[in-house]
Image (cartoon, helix red, strand yellow):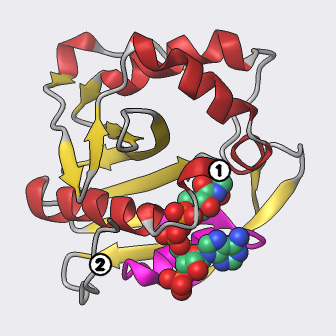
Amino acid sequence: MTEPDLTDAVAPVPLQVGPYRLDVPAASDTADVVAAFHDPDVATWNPAGGGEITAEERAPLWIADRATWTSQHASWVVRDHDGTVIGQVSLHHLDHESGTGEVGYWLTPRGRGRGIGTAVLDAATTYALDTLGLFRIELFHAVENEASCRMALRCGYALEGTTRQSYRYGDGLRHDEHLHAILATDPRPEVRPPA
Ligand SMILES: CC(C)(COP(=O)(O)OP(=O)(O)OC[C@H]1O[C@@H](n2cnc3c(N)ncnc32)[C@H](O)[C@@H]1OP(=O)(O)O)[C@@H](O)C(=O)NCCC(=O)NCCS
């Protein structure tokens, strides 16, 4: 995790998705984020990316990094009704000159299967295309990750192909990935926020 470039800081913009707050993470979220990093599915499909660092060591660094928006990065934690962090969605590799970026996400077990992931991805996509004015957002997931694939398709991210062994996931293996993307000119499916 690199040090944020504070000269490029952008004020974070919280969003509301139905009853769920897409928020800037705070130090008080550390225990929720540690628990998320210990979840086997998050650990497998959203790995830290090398280095020997525990979830407890990583969580405060992750929170500080995610709370610091720049022109290349915007991200939110997803809060359940009671404020607990149940997920995150992130826009990164934002390139305003080429109009491109990439999106990533995870939900904790408590947040899954409630339609929240789809609604949150849709909100981040709307922010990227309509508020930031980007033209193309890419989304990668391991081909085995069917929930992520369905969510991408539900939000209008067309499946463009399979990249071969393109990312080493948390199981230590290189996996083939689906590359999805949405363009500003693509049709946008209607996604209703869950209650
Ligand atoms: C992938 C993930 C974000 C999906 O979030 P979610 O809130 O559970 O998804 P939703 O409830 O919005 O459902 C999205 C779609 O996936 C389907 N789905 C959900 N869980 C599924 C599963 N275990 N297997 C197959 N499909 C599944 C839903 O039926 C829905 O499809 P539909 O709209 O065609 O009916 C979540 O499961 C997760 O964080 N998993 C662990 C980490 C991870 O995979 N991160 C993403 C890395 S790319």
Task: Decide if residue 193 is on the left or right side of residue 37.
Answer: left
Task: Label 2: state its secondary structure.
Answer: loop
- Mark 1 vs 2, N-terminal side: 1
Instruction: Select label 1 or label 2 by which is in front.
Output: 1
Identified by mark 1, the residue type is: Pro
The location of residue 14, given as percent across then percent down, is 19, 38
**Residue pointed to by mark 1:** 109
Residue in the image at 33% along x and 23% along y: 67
Compared with residue 161, is residue 70 higher up or lower down, i.e. above or below? above
Report ligand 1 position as a quadrant: bottom right
Mark identifier at residue 191: 2
As for residue 144 lying within the magenta part, the answer is yes
Query: Badge 1 local density, few (<14 within 10 Å), some, or many (20+)?
Result: some
Query: Identity of the amino acid at label 2?
Result: Val
Residue at x 19% of width, y 20% of height: 9
CA separation in Å, label 1 and label 2: 21 Å
In magenta segment, residue 32: no
State the mark number for residue 78: none
Q: Percent position (x, y) of residue 32? A: 55, 26
Write the residue at 32% across / 65% down. Answer: 195
